[in-house]
Image (cartoon, helix red, strand yellow):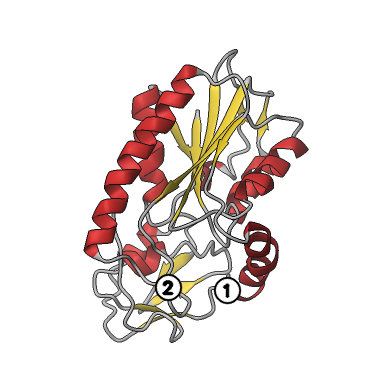
Amino acid sequence: MIFYFSGVGNSAWVARHLAERLQDNVLSVAEEINKGINYVAKPGEKVGFVFPVYGWEPPKIVLDFVGKMQMNCPDYLYFVCTCGDDVGKTTKVFESAIRAKGWKCNAGFSVTMPDTYVCLPGFDVDDKATLQLKMENATARVEYIAGELLKGVQMAKFDCYEGPLPYTKTYVLGGLFRAFLMSPKPFKATDKCTACGLCAKKCPVHNIKVEDKPQWGNNCTMCLACYHACPHHAIEYGKRTKNKGQYSI
């Protein structure tokens, strides 16, 4: 079983490629979180989690899902996180959530993918050359991760790029990110909006309703799927996304 959460699509891409290589199946965290299913990990089965890094830690929806999920202790559990640059102490945060279940995290990997965060000064999507290079490297990286998992690594293996000042990023800047940059209130649709409904369709947590224009509810993960999916570039996050690019995979 591979459980994944994805907004714009990077983590879904990784999860699908891993599943194909490992001959496994994928389950969407956003769709599974409210089902109350009792999952059964078979003897020797590897259970994986694939998710993006938000504010140098796993998205809250992933941590909430881990806390809620009902499953016997898996023999082998791993995670793969996607990021634009670095992951800070994501490994430590995810391991803590797993330990709280009485389980053990056996392995973790990071995959550098194209940037999607555009809501702060200096943050934008990658240029075409950087995007192409990242995707080529990501393809090779996922193949490497799949090979490691197929080997059935016995000792704990964590291969995640923390980057500089990982504690500061996760526990200081990450806290500020969660406190001040996770609100859906700044989202708005400009006059270019045609009410096509694609933003609502792409929202993984069904947080958008479209009447004359899209309206955002309070169950927002700040994944920015709505912003990047809009065919008319009509969605803005306050003034922070003005003249920023869009990304699709």
Q: Judge left or right: residue 167 versus residue 197.
A: right
Q: Judge left or right: residue 224 versus residue 134.
A: right
Work out whether residue 240 or residue 115 is closer to the camera in this orientation and state it.
Answer: 115
- Amino acid identity at mark 2: Phe
Name the element at disc 1: loop
Q: Where is residue 11 in the image (x, y as percent from the top left)?
A: 42, 47
- Please tell me whether mark 2 or mark 1 is closer to you in this view: 2
Image vertical order of residue 182 relative to residue 56, above or below: below
Residue assigned mark 1: 181
Image vertical order of residue 88 relative to residue 216, above or below: above
Work out whether residue 57 or residue 49 is closer to the camera in this orientation and state it.
Answer: 57
Q: Where is residue 194 in the image (x, y as percent from the top left)?
A: 26, 77
Residue assigned mark 2: 123
Mark 2 is surrounded, within 10 Å at the Cα level, by few (under 14), some (14 to 19) or many (20 or more) other residues, namely some
| Residue visible at 50% across and 81% down in the picture | 186
| Residue visible at 30% across and 68% down in the picture | 246
Can I make out residue 25 in this image?
A: no
Q: Position of residue 87 (x, y in %)?
A: 55, 53
Mark 1 is surrounded, within 10 Å at the Cα level, by few (under 14), some (14 to 19) or many (20 or more) other residues, namely some
The numbered dot on residue 190 is none
Name the element at disc 2: loop
Q: Quadrant of residue 122?
A: bottom left
Q: Judge left or right: residue 133 versus residue 14.
A: left
| Residue visible at 43% across and 58% down in the picture | 84
Q: How many labels does the image show?
A: 2
Q: Residue furthest top?
A: 43
